[in-house]
Image (cartoon, grey):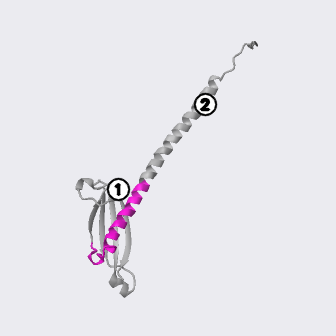
Amino acid sequence: MPRFRSTGREVAFSLIEITLALGITSFTLISLLGLMAVATNAEKEARIDTTLGMIVTQSLSRFTDGGLYSELSSGMEYYKYDGTLATKTADYYFECQIFVDAPSLGTPELLLKAKQITFKINWPYAAPSPNQQIFTTTLAEY
């Protein structure tokens, strides 16, 4: 059976090497945590932008798909966080003001059949200084 000889010195990591490894690991973990905060904020903004698009699409489709073009008028609508129409005050997250006007440009024939619609959406509802997004489109009845 072979015997191992000791050279008198054990091989191991020095304190400096361990400190450097811990420093590099700590820096990496802190950087990753910072990136997670940025990614979470970007995800929230993307979700809000998607919801705003859904709100405008739903509002327009109620009038165009339902044949209610002639009933399109200015008003106020309230939506939940998921973008669906809210029925109770407690569920509101988005406030959507709709302004219906005659378009400012176009042929006389188009001006008679067209409506310019502006959606001014504020969120969160009833906040002291809410976020705001404005969408404008022109619809024409054929």
Q: In which quarter of the image is residue 111?
A: bottom left
Q: Which of marks 1 and 2 is nearer the N terminus?
A: 2
Give coordinates of residue 109: x percent, y percent: 36, 87
Tell me the residue that label 2 is attached to.
Answer: 21
Location of residue 26 with respect to 37 vertically, above or below: above
The residue depicted at 38 percent of the width and 59 percent of the height is 51
For the residue marked with disc 1, what is the amino acid? Answer: Asp
Element on which disc 1 rests: loop
Q: Quick one: which residue is furthest to the front in this view?
A: 1
Decide which of 99, 12 is in the foreground and name it: 12
Label 1: how many Cα within 10 Å (few below 14, some 14–19, many 20+): some
For the residue marked with disc 2, what is the amino acid? Answer: Ala
Q: Give the range drawn in magenta.
A: 45-73
Tell me the residue that label 1 is attached to.
Answer: 82
Q: Quick one: which residue is furthest to the bottom in this view?
A: 108
Number of numbered discs: 2
Give coordinates of residue 129: x percent, y percent: 32, 55
Decide which of 82, 13 is in the foreground and name it: 82
Decide which of 95, 79 is in the foreground and name it: 79
Location of residue 94 with respect to 14 vertically, above or below: below
Label 2: how many Cα within 10 Å (few below 14, some 14–19, many 20+): few
Spatial CA distance of label 1 from label 2 is: 46 Å
Left or right for 43, reference 142: right
Location of residue 102 with respect to 86 vertically, above or below: below
The residue depicted at 29 percent of the width and 61 percent of the height is 85
Decide which of 4, 70 is in the foreground and name it: 4
In the rendered structure, find residue 71 and report the number of the disc placed on it.
none
Q: Quadrant of residue 61?
A: bottom left
> Residue 71: within the magenta?
yes
